[in-house]
Structures are given as C-alpha cells and as structure tokens.
Image (cartoon, grey):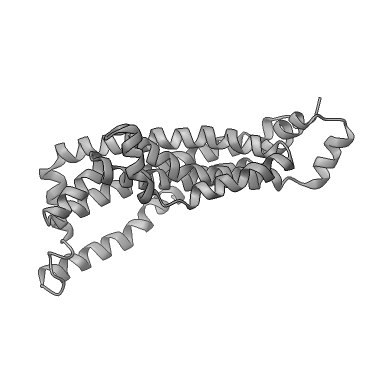
C-alpha cells in the first residue's frame, strides 16, 4: 500500500496541472504558440515516436557513458585526494576550478578536439557530472568519526587500511548522494553537448526551436526529464542495495 501511494500521490498534481493547462490553452487564455496543450505534446510523442525514440536512445547512451565515467573516475580521484591532507590541498582546488568553467563555453572546444557526435556529448556529460562525485566522496571520507580514526591509528593501521576499511565504507551514504546528483547532471550535460554537436534529444530541441515547433520542444524536454528520473531511480536502487548490505563488511584493521 505504501509503494502504491508513493507512485499514485505524485501523479495527482501532474494530472491536475495537465488538465488545467489543457483547459486554459483550449480556451485561449494561454497562447498555444507559447505553451502547447498536453494533448499536442502527446500527439507529437505518438506521431514522431520513431524519431524521438532514436534521439532518446542516443542521449541515454551518451549520458550513461558520461555518468559511468564520472562515477568511476570521480571516486578514484576522491580516494586519491583523501589519502593525505597535502595531496588534497594540492589538487582539490583544480577540481573546484574545473567545475566553475561554464560547459557552454568549452563545448565548442570539445567539438574541435573530439569532433561532432557522440564523443563530444559523452565528454560534456562527464565534465558536468564528475564534480558532485568528487566533492561528496571527499566530504564523506573526511567526515569519518575522529575517534574511529584514532582507534585505527592506535592499532597501527596503515593509511591504506584506514582509507579502505574505515573512511570509504563510512562515506558510502555521501558517495551515493553524489551519484544521485551526478545522475541528473549527466543528462543536462548530454543535452548541452548535443546543442553544439547535434544528435539526440538536444538536437531535436535545437531543430524544433528553429522551426517554431514548441510542441516538439516540450515533447523532447519531457523525454529528457524522464531520462533523468530513470537514472536517479537506478542510483536510488543501487543506494538501497549497498546501504542494506553495509553491515556485512568488517571494518577492523588487520
């Protein structure tokens, strides 16, 4: 019953808002060239299903590749930063600087380096989504209980043992939180990359904008949002699996 409510309750505002917009647009209270009626968006999803499906798969593939790379490399870099304070002080500012560079400004450079198409889109998704993984992972590992860290030190645990047997397991909630943030950002990065290099849902949105097809723009945006929700849900499932099994690890230094 609880699971049914978690699905049905969020649908109530969606249905009410959709019906309200349908009424307002059909009664010409809102111009349809600014906001399409939900029925118009649905018609586009049906009539252009083949094109939108292909674009959805392209964006999903690029975003998934960029997200996977950011999760793996971001966690590895966070482990490197957490190994010692001087390493973190030397290299963490570069991670922050990397995040502050606007993607839309460097996307043309990515096209020059990687060419049009999938490589640029994957790189865009990776660049946007890696910093939350690094930041959350470092924060989680640095937030380990100092008493436990002192206990490991008293038991002559090596820095690697402390890192992998104490800091990393206790940082898993923060790390998985970073993965969740990165899941949504990866889709945003992929869409921005497609604005520049073409293809995917970003390419559909760009072309539809030039054609003044606001209904097609909304349809593509809706699919991009659903893709972000899908990624977030998958990470949430991973979150439950890992955190449920956290009690199985042995954090005693050997």
Could you say which is closer to the camera, residue 147 or residue 2? 147
Residue 38 rendering spot, x and y as whole percentages: 18, 58
Residue 156 drawn at (x, y percent): 87, 30
Location of residue 18 (image quadrant) = bottom left
Name the residue at 22% across, 44% down. Answer: 203
- From the top left corner, tell me how far across and down residue 227 is, in percent: 33, 43
Answer left or right for 187 relative to 153: left
Does residue 222 appear to the left or right of 72 in the view shown?
Answer: left
Residue appearing at x 35%, y 34% in the figure: 113
Which residue of the protein is positioned furthest toward the bottom in this rendering?
Answer: 29
Question: Is 188 situated left or right of 68 in this image?
Answer: left
Furthest residue to the right? Answer: 154
Q: Could one spot residue 124 in this view of the protein? A: yes
- Which one is in front, 178 or 135? 135
Choose between 2 and 170: the one closer to the eye: 170
Q: In which quadrant will I find the C terminus?
A: top right
Q: Is residue 174 visible?
A: no
Residue found 13% across the figure and 49% down from its top: 44
50, 211: nearer the viewer: 211
- Answer above or below: position of 38 versus 21: above
The residue sitting at 35% across, 44% down in the picture is: 107
User: Residue 204 location, x and y as percent?
Assistant: 19, 45
Marker count (numbered): 0
């Amino acid at each position: 019953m609880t699971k049914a409510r978690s699905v049905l309750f969020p649908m109530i505002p969606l249905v009410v808002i959709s019906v309200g917009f349908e009424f307002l647009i059909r009664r010409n209270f809102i111009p349809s060239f600014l906001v399409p009626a939900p029925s118009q968006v649905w018609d586009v999803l049906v009539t252009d299903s083949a094109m939108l499906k292909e674009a959805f798969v392209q964006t999903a593939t690029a975003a998934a590749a960029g997200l996977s790379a950011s999760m793996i490399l971001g966690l590895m870099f966070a482990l490197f930063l957490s190994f010692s304070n001087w390493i973190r002080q030397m290299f963490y500012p570069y991670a922050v600087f990397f995040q502050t560079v606007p993607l839309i400004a460097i996307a043309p450079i990515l096209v020059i380096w990687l060419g049009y198409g999938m490589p640029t889109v994957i790189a865009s998704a990776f660049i946007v989504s890696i910093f939350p993984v690094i930041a959350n992972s470092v924060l989680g590992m640095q937030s380990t209980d100092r008493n436990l860290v002192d206990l490991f030190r008293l038991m002559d645990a090596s820095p690697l043992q402390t890192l992998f047997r104490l800091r990393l397991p206790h940082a898993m909630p923060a790390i998985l939180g970073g993965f969740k943030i990165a899941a949504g950002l990866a889709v945003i990065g992929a869409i921005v990359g497609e604005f520049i290099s073409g293809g995917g849902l970003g390419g559909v949105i760009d072309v539809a904008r030039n054609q003044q097809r606001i209904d097609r723009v909304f349809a593509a945006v809706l699919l991009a949002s659903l893709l972000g929700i899908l990624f977030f849900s998958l990470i949430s499932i991973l979150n439950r699996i890992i955190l449920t099994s956290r009690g199985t690890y042995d954090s005693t230094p050997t």
